[in-house]
Image: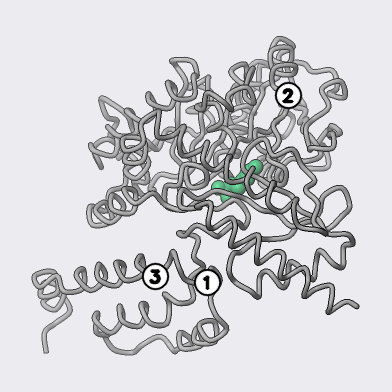
């Protein structure tokens, strides 16, 4: 029997594992756009086959891949296809899947330029492209992180550093104990990851100064408290339920002039700025200081991929600073100075490929099509007796409600059982709602019609069940 090293060299030589993986992936792609979105009960039950003891001996790579394919694949949720409308999950553009496959083999970690010259170069290039695409100042820095959870964290860390520095306090050196007090101001519709970041950074969520919001979840500008040099104001581009945008034009310039640091959570909505017909939603956003956005949602890159953009590169880099005797600073970009992690995967490769493939016009067409499909969904569902749409569909989100909470809940359950599409529930202004998030390049008009038919059938069934 070959020793471990000999065996692995043998596998590399034949490349039969890569070929198997590739072939399984191709079959998956052939089926995923037509199959039911959520796994069947049988597929879920089969997951029990993974409950094994840690193997004592080496395994066979062909069998491992085969097991993943037959028992793992069917238990995936078909987020890649066109009828997944849960949370705000994007699909993946075909070019990004291919670029990710190639870069998986490259296995780059762009912490430092010396670790990955290609990673470092693409991060610099995409940083510049994003400034252009989102019409942000030329010195805006970008850090490439796992998602908006972390991007929010980075933006608030930069704000914390910057505001305390203005007040004569270095938070890296001295911490928060005994520092001048900072104020955190945000809307009562702030995303839960914003609250998480606030906790992680030591502000304490009980100290948040909450601002009331209107029927769409937008901060009411006149309710924002007096702001000053110690303030951090967090706004939102794309409410996770309604898709609404805060009124940046009224709020941002004034807040910045008062000395507040403004951070915008634009997880899926920030891209509206790149679309001529939707950019009105982001007017005034340029007066903020940091912006968080995902690539894995609206832009449809594979998981995981988020971006922190910051107008004060020094504040971002200071907040995320690190030193070490073995660090090699590059002539160009060392990615780790813009992110909390040292090692990270080179997610920039798929992001670069997405932007190179789409171009500015492609980004517009992609996002506008999502908006059109959301509008189509709204129009179609409003024709069905018993459904009401609660929000203005300004972007890609549609909030649907039945006559009673009980009917909404039972209908939602039936839709999920039907598995034609997948939608989640939420709570809006004290009522149960169904959230529909159109976030896939692959959603066709036909997908919308099929899904609306499933909604209609599920409501009829619910009415019978409850009568
Ligand atoms: C999804 C989302 C987040 C969290 O982003 P992740 O990429 O899941 O970390 C934050 N804010 C809003 C508005 C979101 O939609």
Q: Is residue 305 above or below residue 327?
A: below
Q: State the colouring used for the structure image.
A: one colour
Nearest the camera: 158 or 443? Answer: 443
Q: Residue at x 76, y 31 (%)?
A: 184
Cα separation between marks 2 and 3: 43 Å
Q: Position of residue 73 (x, y in %)?
A: 41, 74
Of labels 2 and 3, earlier in sequence is 3
* Residue 201 as seen in the image, left or right of residue 341: right
x and y percent of residue 273 in the render? 55, 26
Residue 378 screen position, x and y as percent: 69, 47
Q: Nearer the viewer, mark 2 or mark 1?
A: 1
The residue tagged with tag 3: helix, strand or loop?
Answer: helix
- Residue shown at the point (50%, 82%) measured from the top left: 43
User: Of the numbered discs in the image, which one, if any, rests on residue 31?
Assistant: 3
Q: Looking at mark 2, is its residue's CB closer than 8 Å to ligand 1?
A: no
Estimate the spatial distance between the alpha carbons at disc 3 and disc 1, rounded to whole Å.
10 Å
Q: Which mark is residue 36?
A: 1
Instruction: Examine the image and state in which quarter residue 362 appears.
Output: top left
Q: CA distance from mark 2 to mark 1?
A: 39 Å
């Amino acid at each position: 029997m070959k020793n471990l090293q000999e065996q692995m060299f043998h596998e590399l030589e034949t490349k039969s594992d890569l070929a198997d993986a590739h072939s399984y992936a191709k079959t998956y792609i052939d089926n995923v756009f037509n199959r039911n979105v959520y796994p069947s009960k049988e597929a879920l039950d089969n997951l029990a086959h993974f409950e094994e003891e840690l193997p004592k001996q080496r395994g066979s790579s062909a069998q491992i891949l085969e097991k993943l394919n037959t028992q793992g694949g069917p238990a995936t949720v078909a987020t890649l296809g066109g009828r997944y409308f849960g949370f705000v999950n994007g699909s993946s553009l075909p070019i990004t899947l291919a670029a990710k496959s190639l870069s998986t083999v490259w296995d780059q970690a762009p912490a430092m330029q010396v670790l990955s010259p290609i990673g470092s170069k693409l991060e610099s290039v995409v940083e510049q492209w994003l400034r252009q695409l989102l019409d942000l100042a030329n010195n805006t820095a970008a850090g490439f992180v796992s998602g908006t959870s972390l991007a929010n964290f980075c933006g608030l860390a930069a704000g914390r550093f910057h505001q305390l520095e203005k007040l004569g306090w270095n938070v890296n050196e001295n911490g928060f104990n005994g520092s001048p007090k900072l104020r955190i101001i945000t809307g009562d519709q702030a995303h839960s990851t914003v609250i998480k970041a606030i906790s992680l950074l030591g502000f304490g969520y009980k100290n948040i100064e909450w601002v009331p919001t209107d029927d769409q979840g937008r901060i009411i500008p006149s309710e924002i408290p007096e702001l000053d040099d110690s303030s951090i104001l967090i706004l939102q581009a794309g409410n996770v339920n309604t898709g609404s945008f805060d009124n940046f034009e009224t709020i941002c310039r004034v807040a910045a002039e008062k000395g507040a640091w403004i951070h915008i959570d634009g997880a899926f909505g920030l891209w509206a700025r790149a679309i001529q017909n939707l950019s009105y939603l982001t007017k005034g956003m340029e007066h903020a200081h940091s912006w968080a956005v995902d690539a894995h949602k609206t832009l449809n890159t594979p998981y995981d991929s988020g971006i922190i953009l910051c107008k004060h590169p020094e504040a971002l880099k200071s907040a995320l600073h690190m030193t070490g005797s073995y660090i090699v600073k590059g002539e160009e970009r060392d990615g780790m100075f813009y992110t909390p992690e040292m090692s990270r995967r080179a997610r920039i490769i798929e992001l670069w490929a997405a932007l190179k493939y789409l171009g500015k016009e492609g980004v517009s067409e992609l996002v506008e099509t999502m908006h059109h499909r959301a509008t189509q969904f709204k129009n179609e569902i409003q024709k069905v007796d018993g459904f009401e749409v609660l929000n203005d569909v300004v972007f890609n989100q549609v909030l649907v409600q039945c006559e009673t909470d009980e009917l909404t809940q039972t209908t939602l359950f039936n839709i999920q059982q039907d598995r034609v599409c997948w939608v989640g529930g939420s709570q809006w202004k004290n009522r149960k709602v169904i959230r529909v998030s159109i976030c896939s390049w692959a959603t066709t008009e036909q997908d919308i019609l099929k899904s609306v038919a499933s909604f209609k059938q599920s409501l009829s069934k619910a009415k019978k069940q409850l009568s």
